[in-house]
Image (cartoon, grey):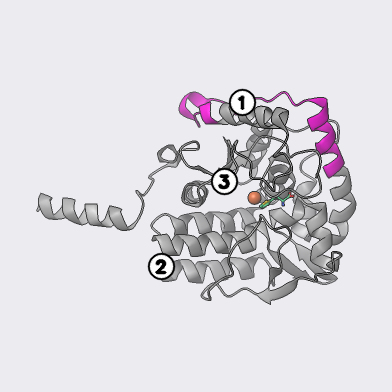
Amino acid sequence: YRFIVTTQLADFNKQVHKIPQSIHDISNGDHILGFGVELAEHHPGFHDEEYKKRRSYIGNLAKLHKILFSGEPIPHVEYSDEEIKIWGEILGKLTYLHPTHACKRYLDTFQLFNFVPDRLPCLQELSEVLMMRTGWQIRPVAGLLHPTDFLNAMAFRTFHCTQYVRHGSQPMYTPEPDICHEILGHIPLLADPEFANLVQLIGLASLRASKQEMLHLTKLYWYTVEFGTVKERDGVKAFGAGLLSSFGELQHMLSGEDGSMPIFEDLDPFKKLPKMDHKCGFQKRYFLCENFSDVASKLTAYAKSL
Ligand code: TIH
Ligand code: FE2
């Protein structure tokens, strides 16, 4: 009997990754993808050695952080004047565009955080606000985390956030997440109970997902939490964090000011979704939802089918 159980388990573990039982089973440092310290050639910081050094310093702080073991707070980063200037510039531009481009629920939760241009908030204080409002917590990460770890952590209401600041040469769009994207894109809506549940749903569905299902869930995450749009009375609004944190992409969403008007489509979680791309600039298509409960019921239906 023991033999059978063990072999079955071994087979099972071959098909799917090891299922984490808690956030402690998920590493924030073992599977960093893409950029990390090795920036790709098209990255705005590719030729900037000082910038790369700064990122690896901040990234290493995140790697050393042990979540909740001994209740260790998220490492504090002393941001330079230049980094704070980039944050302030992004905040200023976005607060000008959000009233017309961001969804109502984002505008409401945004008010909870008194973001000011001359101070870059620390992740620890934001994590505490989320914990009080929705039971979510932030965990620092050195760069883009492997989707399996990233999605699995969402099952435990844990959101991995980068801590470095984007390169100053292109503040209005960066091809990868940075702390401005995390704070201005993700954090406010994670304080909204309905949205917070919807994000956790993707995480829960990912716990026992096969490789193929994981890729599909990553796309569902991508086209909702990162680049989702919603119909409101006065037009299409953004709820995806990749839109909300990028002045350039928000403008593109509504005006296609670069000459390429994006396509809007209904989201069908059972259909094959387009390949994800964030290295070639703005998205070419966005999925348009009715409201958060529409997104949640679509995701629930798909999760139940797994
Ligand atoms: N493009 C976003 C920004 O400029 O804020 C960051 C990213 C979100 C998702 C992928 S890259
Ligand atoms: Fe993101």
Residue range highlighted in magenta: 63-90
Decide whether residue 118 is among the magenta residues: no
Q: Residue at x 83, y 26 (%)?
A: 81
* In front: label 3 or label 2: 3
**Is ligand 2 closer than 8 angstroms to the Cβ of mark 1?**
no
Provide the residue designation for mark 3. Answer: 34
Q: What is the quadrant of residue 39 in the picture?
A: top right
Work out whether mark 1 precedes mark 2 in sequence or the reverse, and give the earlier one. 1
Provide the residue designation for mark 1. Answer: 75
- Compared across the picture, whether 82 is left or right of 73 comes to right
Q: Residue at x 60, y 62 (%)?
A: 276
Provide the residue designation for mark 2. Answer: 306
Decide whether residue 82 is among the magenta residues: yes
* In front: label 1 or label 3: 3
Figure quadrant of the C terminus: bottom left
Work out whether mark 3 precedes mark 2 in sequence or the reverse, and give the earlier one. 3
Q: Residues within 10 Å of mark 2 (few under 14, many from 20)?
A: few
Task: Tell me the distance, in whole angstroms, between the alpha carbons under discs 1 and 2.
Answer: 38 Å
Work out whether mark 1 precedes mark 3 in sequence or the reverse, and give the earlier one. 3
Kindly identify the amino acid type of the residue bearing the numbered disc 3: Gly
**Is ligand 2 closer than 8 angstroms to the Cβ of mark 2?**
no
Give percent across and percent down for residue 24. Answer: 43, 37
Kindly identify the amino acid type of the residue bearing the numbered disc 2: Leu
Kindly identify the amino acid type of the residue bearing the numbered disc 1: Pro
**Is ligand 1 closer than 8 angstroms to the Cβ of mark 3?**
no
Task: Tell me the distance, in whole angstroms, between the alpha carbons under discs 1 and 3.
Answer: 23 Å
Q: Is residue 159 visible?
A: no
Q: Residue at x 46, y 56 (%)?
A: 204
Give percent across and percent down for residue 122. Answer: 70, 31
Image mark count: 3
